[in-house]
Image: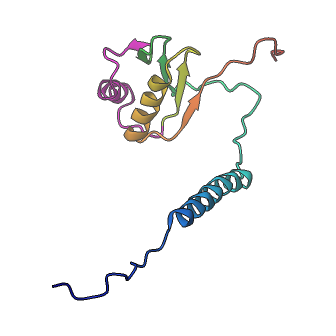
Amino acid sequence: MRIGNDNADEFEINVVSLIDVLLTLLMFFVLTTTFVQQGHMKVSLPQASDKASVPSNNTLILVIDKQGHFFVANNRVLGDDEATLKRAIVAVAGSDRDRPVLLRADGMTPHQAVVTAMDALGQLGFTHLSIATAPPTGAPSS
């Protein structure tokens, strides 16, 4: 025996159109928020001197060749990993962390090799790092 009304319709709400509108609004806000953040971003670019500076006798010179091999004070570092590079830097620099460092990397050096060298120097506590550059071709030399 069944108790209740057989003719009673079940109450249901159709939310498909509501979901479509909410997703459209969400996409609109995500896209416009991204553009607004980029438009208001202020960046202060670093400035560099246009005259060449001559490294002092105390400067530690770290060279990276085209293949990504490291040279510390004109001595080839046997191994291209960060731990080996740090040992070679400590062997040359000792405990002098205030010593200026000049990083000379070939223009075709893999970016990872430069980042590895900078990371090793930072972990060892070196704070005076200069990156050697060449003037653009065709620029007048002083």
Q: Within the image, what quadrant is residue 107 found in? A: top right
| Horizontal side of residue 48 vs 95, given as left or right | right
Is the residue 21 above or below the residue 140 in the image?
A: below
| Horizontal side of residue 53 vs 131, given as left or right | right
Q: Within the image, what quadrant is residue 50 found in? A: top right
Image position, residue 8 (x, y; %): 37, 83
**In this view of the protein, which residue sits in the foreground, 110 or 82?**
110
Which stretch appears magenta?
74-98
Question: Extreme right residue here?
Answer: 140
The color scheme shown is rainbow
| Quadrant in which the C terminus appears | top right
Image position, residue 13 (x, y; %): 47, 73
| Residue 82 highlighted magenta (yes or no) | yes
Which residue shows up at 82% across the image and 16% down it?
139
**In this view of the protein, which residue sits in the foreground, 23 or 44?**
23
| Horizontal side of residue 105 vs 35, given as left or right | left
Which residue shows up at 39% across the image and 29% down it?
93
**In this view of the protein, which residue sits in the foreground, 86 or 95?**
86
Image position, residue 71 (x, y; %): 43, 16
Which residue shows up at 71% across the image and 56% down it?
36
Image position, residue 82 (x, y; %): 34, 28
| Horizontal side of residue 106 vs 10, given as left or right | right
Is the residue 4 above or below the residue 62 in the image?
A: below
